[in-house]
Image (spheres, rainbow, N blue to C red):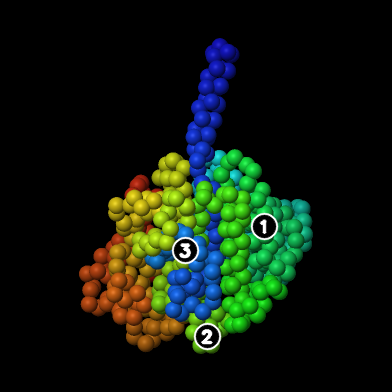
């Protein structure tokens, strides 16, 4: 072929690609996604005004400026699988992780060839950054390339020396920049991109994450391209460690102090957008990875001492199949696009982020991308004409399944499916039914099991669940493979 023709053809291709990128970038909003750790639905005062005793003025203000979803769910009732779902648009129970969470070191939860939200957004010119908790596996390695576990006393407690190399960090899964920690048990070991950079006192972590997010927004203010900030806070998960300035602020103990500081961090991030003139063209998401923990320093003490109900009117807590485990705060603000002060009752899921970003940027997902993701952009813009999901699948820490379709919810476990009582083994000893069926319109607290009265509904929902598992997807499209074989009837742990 003539060399000049080759050059002209190559130039045309480059021009076409550049034009597509410019068209995609022009006018697109920046995106800030704030995900708290173990924040219950009822801990935001605007969502639970009668029984939330901790002031959350900044998130309340966000709610007044945007849309509050009252039926939004995390992809799981525990940390790791939820974060997998947010970033991939796929239920984590389709992977090897059939229960529980992961440790650092091992096979990363997100496969190298799987599309993530940041990778998708980068195609449209976004700068992508993750700040905070990862909990999807990255590996600490020595100079010889061998994995370093750290302390041998506790599998999870690994104090890594500054300078330790990190493989499979978020910068290998679509993010341009990362600073944070893997999970709360090694919260003091801070990683920047691919190196351990610091040992931070646990009571300085939340403030640091807020400061870094504010600084990043300032850095982006003078740039032309939009950005995606994934801010994964450490709070109010253990270790409960409010900074010195926040100790005693609530008058209700360290946990409530930590909640107040969490709200303050959100406020500082939102104020940074305002100060830089970026708020009007930034799409803000605020949510939690699962419900509040029921531990003695959390729900049990708060309800007894102060009348603070972290799960509001919902049954259960973090880990459970009941809604208190996975129905989460979900607030979205986009000035001029999302109706301020609005409330939406659509059934939505964290897995919807990928499809939402794809539609926002004019991209089409392949058959093996975002298999459980549905765009909520029409809902945000007030243009939806049908339900977002036909059904949403829930998954507890013990791997117990539930499925929700319309007003009906079917739980495939006789107890909580998680840590709350009665646990499944105890429920069986009590002679409780293997299935729980609830009318969530009339009985949002899941108090009256209707499985015996509606066996046909139990069978219909069970069939639907099995189909969504077998198809490798819950959205329309070509069937896909799950990573492992899946038994919808998990044995008790």
Q: Is residue 282 visible?
A: yes
Tell me the tag on residue 212: 1
Residue 5, above or below 369: above
Q: Is residue 75 visible?
A: no
Callout in the foreground (3, 2): 3
Q: Earlier in the sequence, mark 3 or mark 2?
A: 3
Residue 109 percent location from the top left of the image:
55, 57
Tell me the tag on residue 290: none
Instruction: Estimate how packed mark 3 is, as few (under 14), some (14 to 19) or many (20 or more) residues with alpha carbons within 10 Å.
Output: many
The residue under the point 46% across, 63% down is 64
Q: Nearer the viewer, residue 454 or 105?
A: 454
Residue 344, above or below 429: above
Q: CA distance from mark 1 to mark 2?
A: 33 Å
Callout in the foreground (3, 1): 3
Residue 435 percent location from the top left of the image:
32, 75
The residue under the point 36% across, 53% down is 382
The residue under the point 50% across, 41% down is 27
Residue position for label 2: 306
Q: CA distance from mark 3 to mark 1?
A: 24 Å
Q: Quadrant of the N terminus?
A: top right
| Left or right for 267, reference 179 | left
Residue 42 percent location from the top left of the image:
47, 74
Residue 422 percent location from the top left of the image:
42, 83
Residue 104, above or below 373: below
Element under disc 3: helix
The residue under the point 36% across, 77% down is 445
Instruction: Estimate how packed mark 1 is, as few (under 14), some (14 to 19) or many (20 or more) residues with alpha carbons within 10 Å.
Output: some
Q: CA distance from mark 3 to mark 2?
A: 24 Å
Query: Pointer 1 and pointer 2: residues touching (CB < 8 Å)?
Result: no
Residue position for label 3: 63
């Amino acid at each position: 072929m003539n060399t000049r023709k080759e050059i002209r053809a190559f130039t045309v291709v480059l021009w076409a690609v550049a034009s597509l990128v410019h068209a995609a970038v022009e006018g697109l909003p920046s995106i800030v996604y704030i995900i708290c750790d173990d924040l219950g639905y009822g801990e935001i005062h605007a969502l639970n005004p009668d029984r939330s005793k901790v002031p959350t003025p900044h998130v309340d203000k966000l709610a007044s400026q945007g849309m509050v979803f009252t039926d939004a769910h995390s992809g799981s009732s525990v940390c790791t699988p939820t974060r997998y779902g947010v970033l991939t648009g796929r239920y984590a129970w389709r992977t090897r992780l059939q229960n529980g969470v992961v440790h650092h070191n091992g096979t990363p939860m997100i496969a190298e060839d799987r599309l993530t939200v940041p990778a998708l957004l980068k195609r449209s010119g976004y700068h992508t950054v993750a700040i905070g908790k990862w909990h999807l596996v990255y590996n600490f390695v020595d100079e010889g390339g061998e994995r370093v576990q750290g302390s041998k006393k506790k599998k999870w407690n690994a104090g890594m020396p500054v300078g330790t190399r990190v493989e499979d960090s978020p910068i290998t899964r679509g993010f341009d920049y990362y600073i944070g920690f893997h999970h709360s048990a090694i919260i003091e070991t801070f990683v920047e991109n691919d190196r351990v950079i610091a040992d931070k006192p646990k009571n300085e972590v939340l403030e640091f994450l807020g400061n870094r997010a504010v600084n990043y927004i300032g850095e982006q203010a003078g740039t032309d391209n939009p950005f995606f900030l994934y801010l994964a806070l450490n709070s109010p998960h253990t270790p409960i460690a409010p900074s010195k300035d926040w100790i005693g602020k609530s008058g209700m103990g360290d946990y409530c102090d930590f909640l107040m500081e969490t709200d303050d961090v959100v406020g500082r991030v939102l104020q940074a957008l305002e100060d830089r003139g970026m708020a009007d063209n930034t799409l803000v998401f605020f949510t939690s990875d699962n419900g509040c923990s029921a531990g003695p320093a959390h729900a049990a003490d708060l309800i007894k001492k102060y009348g603070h109900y972290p799960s509001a009117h919902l049954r259960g807590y973090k880990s459970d199949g009941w809604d208190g485990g996975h129905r989460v705060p979900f607030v979205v603000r986009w000035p001029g696009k999302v109706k301020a002060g609005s409330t939406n009752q659509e059934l939505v899921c964290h897995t919807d982020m990928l499809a939402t970003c794809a539609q926002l940027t004019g991209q089409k997902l392949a058959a093996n991308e975002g298999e459980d993701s549905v765009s909520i952009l029409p809902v945000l813009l007030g243009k939806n004409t049908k339900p977002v999901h036909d059904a949403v699948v829930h998954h507890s820490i013990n791997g117990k399944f539930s499925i929700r379709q319309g007003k009906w919810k079917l739980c495939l476990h006789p107890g909580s499916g998680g840590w709350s009582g009665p646990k499944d083994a105890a429920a069986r000893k009590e002679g409780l039914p293997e299935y729980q069926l609830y009318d969530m319109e009339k009985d949002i607290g899941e108090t009256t099991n209707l499985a015996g009265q509606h066996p046909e509904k139990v069978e219909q929902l069970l069939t639907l669940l099995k189909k969504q598992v077998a198809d490798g997807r819950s959205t329309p499209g070509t069937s896909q493979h799950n990573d492992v074989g899946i038994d919808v009837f998990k044995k008790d742990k």
